[in-house]
Image: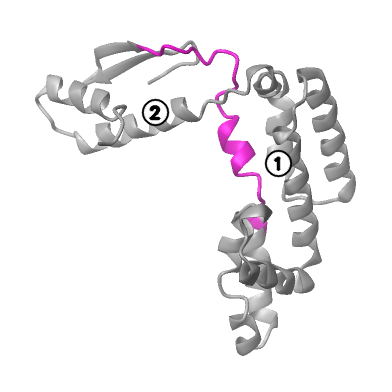
Amino acid sequence: MINMNGAAQIHYRDQPLFHLRLESSPTDVEPKLFAPFRASRPSDRTHSQLHRLKRELPPQEYASLKGALWAFRKNQADLETPEQDLLKRVFAYAPELEQADAYREQLTAIFEEALSKEEATKKLQDWQQQVRASGLRCYERFLKTLDTWREEITNYFLNRHNSGFVEGLNNKIRVIQRRAYGLRDEEYLRLKVLSCMLPEL
């Protein structure tokens, strides 16, 4: 697997298969930055709220909320007009989700601003205080991650790099290893791993 020094060691049958070094080392980026930032919509809470509405609303009325989960996962700027109307109906039934969504958009805006590391740290701390003061529980896990990896996460603002490529490659390697269970040709596995980094023709 790839470590944050930009080096990868692929193992097969408990033996090193080959080493790889990335041209651009992602040492200054927290390895879990890409996931929490992009997955910061409290979708678990959305599930529970929708289940509550399913129990409480008449079937025909609940049917009008179909597709709300997918719309909720999208950025506001990417929503089509029907999706915006759909979320308005959901938020009318579940104001807590509207508040959670507003905090999510604020977080996204912080990462899209041209901020220094110090400015970003201050804004993230202010955002955390607001979320905690709101009493929302759907961000608790993410807030703990932000507390634990604050220094590494805010390194993103030094050069705007994230670990998306590294995490994506790690996932591809895991898939190849699972599919290659019982494969005897180690050279073939090595080529499969290398080929997954080639651009599509």
Q: Quadrant of the N terminus?
A: top left
Q: Which mark is residue 108?
A: 1
Q: Where is residue 156 in the image (x, y as percent from the top left)?
A: 65, 22
Q: Given the current orientation, which residue lies at the most extreme front position?
A: 201
> What residue sits 60% from the left and 62% below the top?
71
**Mark 2 lies on residue:** 170
Q: Residue 153 carries which label?
A: none
Q: How would you classify the magenta stretch by its main secondary structure?
A: loop
Q: Residues within 10 Å of mark 1 (few under 14, many from 20)?
A: some
Q: Position of residue 165 (x, y in %)?
A: 45, 28
Q: What residue type is labelled 1?
A: Thr
> What residue sits 60% from the left and 87% below the top?
59
Q: Gap in Å between the C-alphas at discs 1 and 2?
A: 25 Å
Residue 42 inside the magenta-drawn segment:
yes
Looking at the picture, tell me which residue is in the foreground, 177 or 65: 65
> What residue sits 65% from the left and 86% below the top?
61
Looking at the picture, tell me which residue is in the foreground, 140 or 172: 172
Q: Position of residue 69 (x, y in %)?
A: 59, 63
Q: Residues within 10 Å of mark 2 (few under 14, many from 20)?
A: some
- Find out whether the residues at labels 1 and 2 contact each other: C-beta distance under 8 Å: no
Q: Is mark 2 on a helix, strand or loop?
A: helix
Residue 12 inside the magenta-drawn segment:
no
User: Which quadrant of the figure has residue 66?
Assistant: bottom right
- Check the image and report above or below for 91 versus 189: below
- Specify the segment rendered in magenta: 21-45
> What residue sits 65% from the left and 64% below the top?
48
Does 13 sit left or right of 111 as displayed? left
